[in-house]
Amino acid sequence: MHIEPGIVTGAKLLISYGTAAAAGTYALKLGWNAVQERGLASLAARTALAASAVFTFFQILPHFPVGVSEVHFILGSTLFLLFGAAPAAFGLALGLLMQGLFFAPFDLPQYGMNLTTILVPLFALHLLAKRVIAPDAAYVDLKYTQALALSTAYQGGVVAWVAFWAFYGQGFGVENLAAVGSFGAAYMLVVIIEPLADLAVLAAAKSLRGLAGSGLFTPRLVNAEA
């Protein structure tokens, strides 16, 4: 997911800096909570793993332009379930930045928009998880319907933000409406794949319960809420 250059330009870019700053501030709050919960070393390790995964998702997994943006397999719910909200947020931000710095410098002016688009749905997913996952359940015991709800929330949020940036930058002309629609239809196909990826990763994690105390994964991966 990358907003195409030229969709939002000039002074209109200023709002993206504001939304990115707000998202970054909330991520820092989650980060502080994570440090208090499990320490700075665990947060740093999980962030590094998440950033490496995000860079792989963006640069190596299939991705292709559709309409106003690109379709990527971000797998935001997978990152959240493995590493927790704060490491996933920091990993998304760093992975996106690394791709822009080393492989796609033309995307850097859109960094604020792209960052907002992938972080805000993650925060919504974080809140939704508290409602759809019982406190006495570990993430490795998720059902398909729960994984689907999380994935749909995240990917739907991404599509909504892409649509916002497209309409904000280019208006509601027929051509722009068609471009947004084609992107949304293509991107929501990820919802078919992501829950299956979540369950596959979680099934593998069940056999690695010994790593639960290593600080490399969120405590909720294999343990109920404290």
Image (spheres, rainbow, N blue to C red):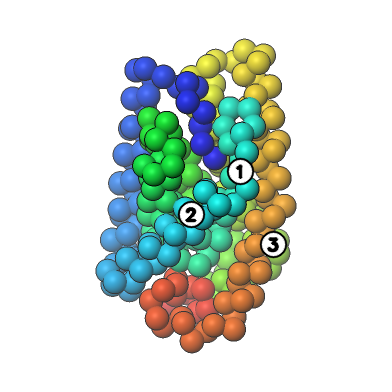
Residue indicated by mark 1: 63
Q: Secondary structure at mark 2?
A: helix
In which image quadrant can residue 102 be found? top left
Amino acid type, callout 2: Val
- Mark 3–mark 2 contact, CB under 8 Å? no
Q: Secondary structure at mark 1?
A: loop
Q: Residue furthest top?
A: 173
Q: Residues within 10 Å of mark 2 (few under 14, many from 20)?
A: many
Q: Residue 126: x percent and y percent?
A: 49, 56
Q: Residue 86: x percent and y percent?
A: 39, 59
Residue indicated by mark 3: 196
- The answer to whether residue 139 is seen in the rendering is yes
> Looking at the rendering, in which quadrant would you find the C terminus?
bottom left
Taking depth in this image into account, of 131 and 20 the one nearest to the observer is: 20
Q: Name the mark nearer the viewer: 3 or 1.
A: 1
Taking depth in this image into account, of 154 and 53 the one nearest to the observer is: 53
Q: Is residue 218 left or right of residue 38?
A: right
Amino acid type, callout 3: Leu
Residue 150, above or below 13: below
